[in-house]
Image: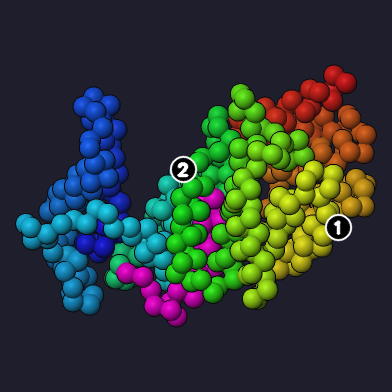
Amino acid sequence: MLARRFGDFATAEDAVQEALLDAATQWPAEGLPDNPRGWLVQVAYRRMIELVRAETARREREDRAARREPDRRGAAPAADESLATDRDDTLVLLFLCCHPTLSTASAIALTLRAVGGLSTAEIARAFLVPEATMAQRIRRAKQRIRDSGVPFRLPDQRERQERLAAVLHVLYLIFTEGHTATLGPDLRRVDLSEEAVRLARAMHTLLPDDSEVAGLLALMLLTDARAAARTGPSGELISLADQDRSRWDATAIAEGTALVTRAMARGPIGPYQLQAAIAALHDEAPTAEATDWPQVLALYQVLERLSGNPVVALNRAVATAMVEGPDAGLAALATLAADPRLAGHHRLDAARAHLYEMAGDRDRAVAHYRAAAGGTTSLPEQHYLRMRAARLAGG
């Protein structure tokens, strides 16, 4: 709302952060206001006014505003004008952060920070770069958006297509962080995964005929359908093979399966549809043993050719083991060891441990489970991997 009204994204973010700080200190002492969202908007609006008035480079700000199309973004509202706190501009902000003046990497990083609420450290881990590098990238992205003078509105059809790939990748990363948090005691960050699903639904409403938008929404629904069964009574992680499938959300599975089926029939086929199709195969299997692994492997092979993503290659190696045996899977993993993008990544050690366990090599499985536990910052993952190592070592 502030960015739309004032046309200054960076300062609007500062004002919102100050309003959130006020809420964090006042609400515990004074109680939750009747309209928390409206309270935050009003306080952020006042903070924005203060920041604008304190801005020493007022002339530069006025010049930037004059170069934009004539509108009322830079003006204060009339006394009787509503602040429209019920308007949801998140999708507009999402496209703004993915402006074509930014590189894809910078656009994704900025959106994860501004829309997804991820910390700079979490974003750096997602990109496999140092935190300081990511902080500089986000700072430069904010500066370029501020200097571009781009209006705060949904882009037209041509601009949407230019930004769509970055927007979908951002939503995928937000959902991934919500599905398995990189830090902390909890396996999931429900706020992030729910927000990603909400935004994906909004994107699907905006672009109902785009097969990859539908594929991404289907992937989220099919993955999130297993959420209730992923953890035990104490919050411990439960592997896909050991989950109680009666706890999976049948409604979400049906919706996701229908979405991806229609999308793949319409085409063209893209990475999100392929991942959704893989998720559907897992979700539709009544037991882990009944999973159609040959079809899963075939889909991963197509996905690997499309994406070139090392994590996809890692998953393809595991699927290879399920079809051709653990030795074939380990041979496939060996080819990934030299990829610098996977250097030190705990998932490579976890996959090796799983396949060595399948092969009956307990000592190597234990060593790699322990190495994987030492490489993840997720406490539930650490506990799960150490438990697997202890069980094998003691058996």
Indicate the position of residue 130 as horizontal and vertical percent values: 54, 47
- Whether residue 147 is visible: no
Taking the magenta stretch, the answer to whether it contains residue 173 is yes
Name the residue: 6% across, 57% down: 79
- Say if 34 sits above or below 172 in the image: above
Please state which of residues 39 and 374 is positioned toward the viewer in this rendering. Answer: 39
Q: Secondary structure at mark 1?
A: helix
Amino acid type assigned to the residue bearing label 2 in the image: Asp
* C-alpha separation, residue under disc 1 versus residue under disc 2: 35 Å
Check disc 1: other Cα within 10 Å, few if <14, some if 14-19, many if 20+.
some
Please state which of residues 370 and 293 is positioned toward the viewer in this rendering. Answer: 293
Name the residue: 64% across, 52% down: 253
Check disc 2: other Cα within 10 Å, few if <14, some if 14-19, many if 20+.
some
Question: Mark number for residue 294?
Answer: 1
Name the residue: 59% across, 51% down: 252
Q: Is residue 13 left or right of residue 187?
A: left
Indicate the position of residue 97 as horizontal and vertical percent values: 41, 62
Instruction: Report the quarter where the N terminus lies.
Output: bottom left
Decide whether the magenta segment is chiefly helix, strand or loop. Answer: helix
Q: Is residue 145 left or right of residue 264?
A: left
Amino acid type assigned to the residue bearing label 1 in the image: Pro
Indicate the position of residue 294 as horizontal and vertical percent values: 86, 57
Q: Which residues are magenta?
A: 153-175
Please state which of residues 164 and 142 is positioned toward the viewer in this rendering. Answer: 164
